[in-house]
Amino acid sequence: MNDTRRTALVIGASRTLGLGIAAEYLRRGWDVIGTVRGGHRTALHDLADSAGGRLTVESLEMTDPAQTAALHDRLAGRSLDLLFVNAAITRGDLPIGEVSTGMFTEVMVTNALSPMRVVETLGELVAPTGTIGVMSSDQGSVSLNTEGGQDLYRASKSALNQLMRCYAVRRAGDGRTLLLMDPGWVRTELGGMEAELSVEESAPGVVETIERHRGEPGLRFLDHEGKDVPW
């Protein structure tokens, strides 16, 4: 069934998973707004050229609160059915004692603080029964961490999960669906070329899981196959 009147805002849609998620929503008949960093041309612009006016490209540096506020103002008056925040960085697999303060701050700001600022700022544009989703990772699960490694990245995703939990508690009784999504181990710049899944395998699963839980209030942590991820 096509949801031709539905609109998704995908934050961080210029490439890999974000681009794949935007493309999947277009395939399902949605209108899509996708954001890119800076003013250079990306694969999202190429996708927009073939989307028949159903894909709008917006510029956003997510770590700049002023740009997030400006995007809110540009989209004011529109009702979103989905806000999905897809953005993360890693700076290598270092023991935490070798991580500089600057690196720690950069990763935490990008992976935890900035996505939640976006949710806090743009969440009010989401329809009362719409969905707010954030890309997390099973590496943010404390209980699943039996092998260690990727200390800073894991910590940033755990922080993101905790902040999303705080957001959900503060908004208890809100009818919106809140989702933390684990896309699986995907072959991207972040996941590496030895990863198990392609973007083409992961992104449709992420979208299908989001859609399966549409209209279910509260927060869940799910993977691309729709399975619950332990916290």
Image (cartoon, rainbow, N blue to C red):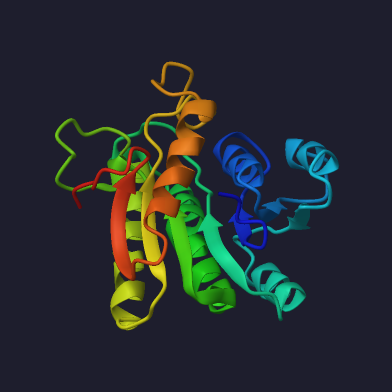
Residue under the image location 51 percent in, 54 percent down? 110
Left or right for 99, reference 8: left
Image side of residue 163 versus residue 79, left or right: left
The front one of 113 and 91 is 113
Q: Residue at x 57, y 43 (%)?
A: 21
The residue sitting at the top extreme is 194
- Residue 66, given in percent of the width and then of the height, sits at 68, 73
Taking 221 as reference, is 144 left or right? left
Q: Is residue 155 visible?
A: no
> Is residue 205 shown above or below 131?
above
Regarding residue 133, the answer to whether it shows in the image is yes
Image coordinates of residue 225 in percent, x first then y, are 33, 38
Q: Nearer the viewer, residue 172 or 139?
A: 172
Q: Residue furthest front?
A: 1
Tell which of 152 and 177 is nearer to you: 177
Number of callouts in the render?
Answer: 0
At x 46%, y 33%, the residue is: 202
Residue drawn at 49 percent across, 32 percent down:
190
- 34 displayed left or right of 223: right
Q: In the figure, residue 74 lies in which quadrant? A: bottom right
Give coordinates of residue 18: x percent, y percent. Answer: 58, 43
Residue situated in front as seen by the camera: 208 or 163: 208
Where residue 137 appears, as percent x and y from the top left, is: 35, 43
